[in-house]
Amino acid sequence: MKNFAFVLASALTLGMLSPVQAQTTWTLDETILTEYNLVSGVHIPWELTWGPDDMLWCTTREGDVLHIDPLSGAYETVLSLNVNDGGVEPGLLGMALHPEWDTTPKVYLAYTAFGNQERLSVFDWDGTALGNEEILHSVGAAGIHNGSRLLVLPDNTLLMSTGDLGDGGVSSQDDNDDNGKILRFNLDGTIPADNPDPNSYVFTKGHRNSQGLCLGPNDVIYSSEHGQYNFDEFNILEAGRNYGWPDVEGSCDGVCDWCDAWNEVDFCNENDVSEPLRTWSPCAAVNDVIYYDHPAIPEWQGSVLMAVLGGFQDPVGGRLNVLHMSDDGLTLESDEYFFDEFNQRIRDVAVNPYTGAVYLALNGPSYTGNGPNLIKEFRPTATDAVNDWSDTRGVDVFPNPASHQVQLAVSASWTGQPYRVVNMQGQVLDQGQLWGQHVLDVSTWNSGAYILEATNGEGVRMTRVLMVQ
Ligand SMILES: [Ca+2]
Ligand SMILES: [Ca+2]
Ligand SMILES: [Ca+2]
């Protein structure tokens, strides 16, 4: 790994399962990332995404949906689903939020139900909890290869990856079987009239177990896919295309170990197979992807960030792949990786659209993942975007948790306004007026959670949870 030094700025140990944030910094070419343990004690976080309500949303394989304050890491469990998370890979997996959130606050979830069903359901969000499940579709499920990554497209349709259930790829080439595919839905669960076959959910076929979906520039759709032993793939999805499995592994080059090498090139020619932009051998267990287009980390701007779990023979292990794309998004120009030092399976990656901070969902050191786990934040050197965000959020609190001092970054409309800090018993610990760079001395406060309350000049009330360790 090049150009990437890390400095331990505290006595805390990397990878330690602790509610305490590791105050570690990582230096890219120029940007400094400060690492925080944002959330601890999470059990196998699977999908991690930034929501339109400026909160982080997370599924856990055991069946919970977490609603996380990205400033403090405090979270609420807003749904506990009864899922089949027996076996090594099933459970509550993918999640996507309705694109017209203000008028239609709904959350899509893909999960393994009892009875070997992988379900796509939609739930209503009432501001505090998810409920009123509507089952939109079901496909086959098994102990392995259940796909289930979800992605809303700009045309307000929804993609869902489905796995081959370990059937050797029989389903993947069967047009009448919804497994081994990428499926496309209208948001009400019906089949879009412009699907390749207007009577079928199938958008693309020939997949083994894709568990990564994201949008790039010009609405290009990226997908990652788990290979068998070799040939993990990074693909661009195009409607109606065949991605080859199980007749093709990786490129159409006659090199494969699960398929018939003599047949691979012929199959590609006869079926217009789409080849991957990149493969990994031996398999590294490539997982969810997100396109990073924020100026806060210029070294990563214009790249696909890929969460990598680390495969059985993979020499590197869990990491974040950074795939540098051409401006049109169609060509992979170079790639590098980071954070293999954690020795953790990295399941998903999300981005704060204001600050450009990157969040990683860790799944523990070994297959198939065991909790308790961490969600880490890597916050870049402050940019103007941070100040813009603070303006909408009012007050940014850091570090959090803290042991000596807490700094409050106060935006303009909140400056000069009254605030107070109370403990969970309602006792007032501190109060006064907020100033632009406000420092609270918490060195004599007991460990625990405190609430910062403030009201701006327009009567808007704001609370922040601050943790003292
Ligand atoms: Ca994701
Ligand atoms: Ca393929
Ligand atoms: Ca091949």
Image (tube, rainbow, N blue to C red):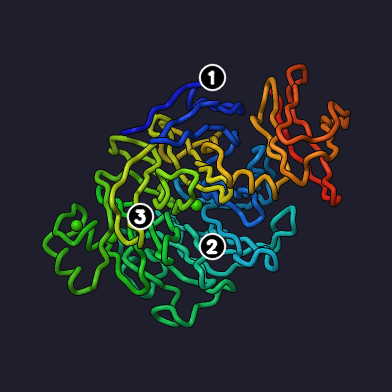
Q: Report ligand 3 position as a quadrant.
A: bottom left
Which residue matches tag 3?
A: 225
Would you place residue 67 above or below residue 437 in this image? below
Observer-nearest residue: 79 or 116? 79
State the image quarter where residue 198 is shown: bottom left
SS of the residue under disc 2? strand
Neighbours of disc 3 within 10 Å: few (<14), some (14-19), many (20+): many
Mark 3, ligand 2, within 8 Å: the answer is yes
Would you place residue 424 above or below residue 44 in this image? above
Q: Tell me the mark number nearer the camera, choosing from 2 and 1.
A: 1
State the image quarter where residue 204 is shown: bottom left
The amino acid on which the numbered mark 3 sits, given as a three-letter code, is Glu
SS of the residue under disc 3? strand
Q: Tell me the mark number nearer the camera, choosing from 1 and 3.
A: 1
Q: Which mark is residue 465?
A: none
Q: Residue at x 85, y 30 (%)?
A: 431
Label 2, label 1: how far apart the Cα atoms are: 45 Å
Is 18 displayed left or right of 231 in the figure? right
Q: Residue at x 79, y 35 (%)?
A: 434
Q: Quadrant of the N terminus?
A: top left
SS of the residue under disc 1? loop
The spot of residue 381 in percent (x, y) is: 52, 36
Which residue matches tag 2?
A: 119
Neighbours of disc 1 within 10 Å: few (<14), some (14-19), many (20+): few
Q: Residue at x 59, y 73 (%)?
A: 188
First along the sequence among labels 2 and 3: 2
Which residue matches tag 1?
A: 10
First along the sequence among labels 2 and 1: 1
